[in-house]
Amino acid sequence: MSRWLVTGGAGFIGSHFVRTALGEGWVDKLAVVDALTYAGNLENLEPVRKHAGFAFHKVDITDGQALAPVFGDGVDAVFHFAAESHVDRSIDSAAAFVQTNVGGTQVLLDVARARGVGRFVHVSTDEVYGSLALGSTERFTETSPIEPTSPYAASKAASDHLALAAQRTHGLDVVITRCTNNYGPYQFPEKFLPLFITNAFEHKALPLYGDGLNVRDWIHVEDHVRAIRLAFDKGKSGEVYNFGGECERANKDLARAICQATHVPTDLIQPVVDRKAHDRRYAIDATKSKRELGFRAGPPIEERLDALVGWYRDHRGWWERIKQGAYRDYYERMYSVRGTT
Ligand code: TDX
């Protein structure tokens, strides 16, 4: 019988992984560990709550004593999604990022090693590579220098190094994945796309940072989840695998596309003060993942935007509950000090 442990399984990407893994019978038993901080939401796991192989543990990964029993009689694989992930929050206050992303990862690595875990898949991000110039054709490969700019990205880079150190020092079977910007259902509405889509529904301003020319490479969360499965199946221990959507878009252009898809005028887009040290451009070269894992990027975001907008339209209760809760205080604080340009 196969057993997996998924940290951060109540978050956006983690819950997508859990729903797919159980829905498609990738594994017999799957335990989710999640601290249920602001971005973790049990509603994201509702579709699998009654699945016979599903278990949920409200545990913080920084708490080694609480974590150890969750491993029960042993697990074959750990999929580590748990992280503080919002760049703007890390600029506001970095402590929680270091605590969870760095400290928590080390605690998890130690417990995994002590419990003889087979494979440890560490889910990371392209942000660890820093920023590329606008207009250049350069893309990040797995051997690009690690040059994070935000406290969030720095904390992820540190956790990547710790995971690789556990592999090299102790022989833990670690595989690292680094992916570009994800989009899809259940994404917390502090991130660009769900924020703009739900604000458009509410006829609220769409706060576009700086000149709006920053470029991100967009991948659907479903493609990312399948890529993680490939890394688990075919990745080599101690290796890093990049995944991207081959879909570089300027924020301004996506903002306009959202206005069109939600039928609101583009003058709802409001230029606001830029993010500090705002990375100009991310772009991934996934040649290695294509060659070694058989990874392929899916259709571009334009072909999936109507479905994306449709999901948020059909799940108004889900995001309204979030936006009306504690998140509202954050939003008012962050965006009231930001000011328009
Ligand atoms: O209100 C906004 N206005 C705006 O113009 C927000 C929230 C964002 N932006 C811009 C900033 C970025 O250029 O949109 C772009 C995307 O922003 P985010 O959704 O905050 O993502 P990003 O900073 O690119 O980081 C994301 O990708 C890598 C994820 O948040 C990370 O968790 C992931 O690791």
Image: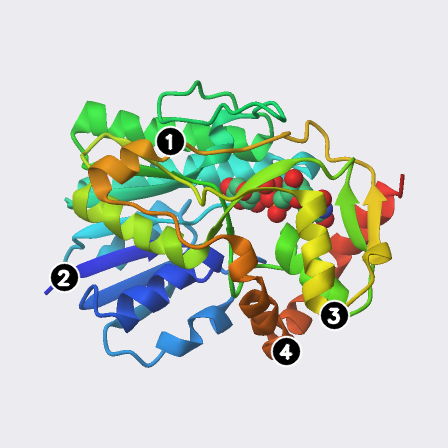
Mark number, residue 201: 3
Element carrying mark 4? helix
Marked residue nearer the N-terminal end (3 or 4): 3
| Mark 1, residue position | 160
Quadrant in the rendering for residue 325: bottom right
Q: Amino acid at mark 2?
A: Ser
Quadrant in the rendering for residue 276: top right
Residue 236 in the image, given as x and y percentages of width and height = 18, 35
Marked residue nearer the N-terminal end (1 or 2): 2
Q: Nearer the viewer, mark 3 or mark 2?
A: 3
Label 2 neighbour load within 10 Å: few <14, some 14-19, many 20+: few
Q: Looking at the image, which residue is at 52% across and 34% down? A: 98
| Mark 4, residue position | 317
Residue 307 in the image, given as x and y percentages of width and height = 54, 69
Q: Residue furthest bottom?
A: 50
Marked residue nearer the N-terminal end (4 or 2): 2
Mark number, residue 2: 2
Marked residue nearer the N-terminal end (1 or 4): 1
Q: Is residue 175 left or right of residue 124?
A: left
Q: Is residue 291 left or right of residue 259?
A: left
> What whole-number distance in Å separates the C-alpha atoms at marks 1 and 3?
38 Å
Q: Is residue 5 left or right of residue 195?
A: left
Q: Amino acid at mark 1?
A: Asp
> What whole-number distance in Å separates the C-alpha atoms at marks 1 and 2?
26 Å
Q: Looking at the image, which residue is at 14% across and 59% down? A: 73
Q: Nearer the viewer, mark 1 or mark 3?
A: 3
Q: In the rendered structure, are the residues bearing label 1 and label 2 in contact, judged by CB atoms less than 8 Å apart?
A: no
Residue 341 in the image, given as x and y percentages of width and height = 89, 39
Marked residue nearer the N-terminal end (1 or 3): 1
